[in-house]
Image (spheres, rainbow, N blue to C red):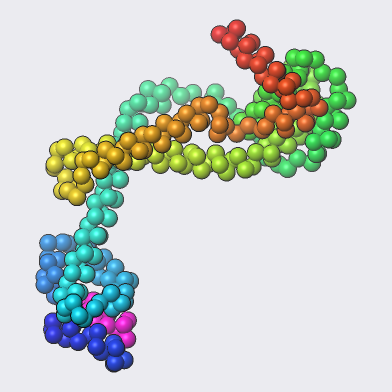
């Protein structure tokens, strides 16, 4: 097939002589045999093969874009192939940068934690969190069962903390609480399951926030890697990246990361049941729940 034959393809499609799919396959064959015409000899065989596959996937769209009033089809095809190859090169460059950034971060993280890893005592690992199961009692039943047992101020304080920590508390901790304060283990377990069920929506938001924070952290470090490569000018894959653009992105990711970290630190994204949920179970007012939490904080500060 010659250049002249390629120029006839749009008309052949219009007359119904060939379909768009047949035209794309014919052009792909021409591209495979005459890749030097499009300047593709500077790329390896794998790259050219991937490029042709991309053309087979996207080629039919080519005929919708072509306008014969602006020039011949071969000229338009040439520009399309060049644009496709440049887009593919940029995609590969971004992938390479991401992989290098991940590797650099992994090495940095390993060096920071090397001593910690070597000193881990696996025998002291804490048992897993109490597994979730649907609570078989509603809030009123739990409240009535709790009211049947007279509790001291200390007992209530411990219960408030346990329920507030329902997502994080372990089976071992539940056993210790029940043993020390003579509590009904099954009742406490039901209370904790009730609280855990109340934070299902929070868990979804918490997971999304974690993913966002991880993403912002990665993108911030990626910008740093891009800037370092731009300064060294040794990596041609980042020739299209401008320093000012990278710094703007880096500042944006830094701000987003700081905001998310602040939200986690201040407890906005913590997986805790509401004060009202805990108050409803224990049959006390929300002010009392806050009071017991304040007492626990004061005790903690005193014992420091």
| Residue at 86% from the left image edge and 30% from the top image edge | 144
Quadrant containing the C terminus in the rendered view: top right
Residue 277: quadrant of the picture: top right
The spot of residue 250 in percent (x, y) is 31, 37
The secondary structure that most of the magenta stretch takes on is: helix
Q: Is residue 209 above or below residue 33?
A: above
Instruction: Provide the residue span drawn in magenta.
Output: 19-33
Question: Which residue: 18% across, 69% down?
Answer: 79
Looking at this rendering, what residue extends furthest in the front direction? 69
- Residue 3 location (% of width, % of height): 13, 82
Between 177 and 40, the residue placed more toward the observer is: 40
Q: Is residue 51 magenta?
A: no
Looking at the rendered image, the quarter that the N terminus falls into is bottom left
Compared across the picture, whether 64 is left or right of 180 comes to: left
Residue depicted at 35% across the width and 31% down the height: 109
Residue 238 relative to residue 183: left or right: left
Please determine whether, in this image, residue 12 is positioned above or below residue 38.
below
Quadrant of residue 40 in the image? bottom left
Would residue 91 be seen by someone viewing this image from the given angle?
yes
The answer to whether 14 is drawn above or below residue 272 in the figure is below
Frontmost residue, 29 versus 247: 247
Specify whether residue 22 is painted magenta.
yes
Query: Where residue 93 sits: x, y (%)?
Result: 24, 51
Give the residue displayed 63% in from the left and 32% down from the top.
272
Give how far across and how far down residue 186 sits, in percent.
78, 31
Q: Is residue 49 visible?
A: no
| Residue sitting nearer the eye, 117 or 95 | 95
User: Which residue of the protein is positioned furthest toward the right in this rendering?
Assistant: 148
Q: Quadrant of residue 75?
A: bottom left
Residue 131 vertical position relative to residue 78 in the rendered view, above or below: above
């Amino acid at each position: 097939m010659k250049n002249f034959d390629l120029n006839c393809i749009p008309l052949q499609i219009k007359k119904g002589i060939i379909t768009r799919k047949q035209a794309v396959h014919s052009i792909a064959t021409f591209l495979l045999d005459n890749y030097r015409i499009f300047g593709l000899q500077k790329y390896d065989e794998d790259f050219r093969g991937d490029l042709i596959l991309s053309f087979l996937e996207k080629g039919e769209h080519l005929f919708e874009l072509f306008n014969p009033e602006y020039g011949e089809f071969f000229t338009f095809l040439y520009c399309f192939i060049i644009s496709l190859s440049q887009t593919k090169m940029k995609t590969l460059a971004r992938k390479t940068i991401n992989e290098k950034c991940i590797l650099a971060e992994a090495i940095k993280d390993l060096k920071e934690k090397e001593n910690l890893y070597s000193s881990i005592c696996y025998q002291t690992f804490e048992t897993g969190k109490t597994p979730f199961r649907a609570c078989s009692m509603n809030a009123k039943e739990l409240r009535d069962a709790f009211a049947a047992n007279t509790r001291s101020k200390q007992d209530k304080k411990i219960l408030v903390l346990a329920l507030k920590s329902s997502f994080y508390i372990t089976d071992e901790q539940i056993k210790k609480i029940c043993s020390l304060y003579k509590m009904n283990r099954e009742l406490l377990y039901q209370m904790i399951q009730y609280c855990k069920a109340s934070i299902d929506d929070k868990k979804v938001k918490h997971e999304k926030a974690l993913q966002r924070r991880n993403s912002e952290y990665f993108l911030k470090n990626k910008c740093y890697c891009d800037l370092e490569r731009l300064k060294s000018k040794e990596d041609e894959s980042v020739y299209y990246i401008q320093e000012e653009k990278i710094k703007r992105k880096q500042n944006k990711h830094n701000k987003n990361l700081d905001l998310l970290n602040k939200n986690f630190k201040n407890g906005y994204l913590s997986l805790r049941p509401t004060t009202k949920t805990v108050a409803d179970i224990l049959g006390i007012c929300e002010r009392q729940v806050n009071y017991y939490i304040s007492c626990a904080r004061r005790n903690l500060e005193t014992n420091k």
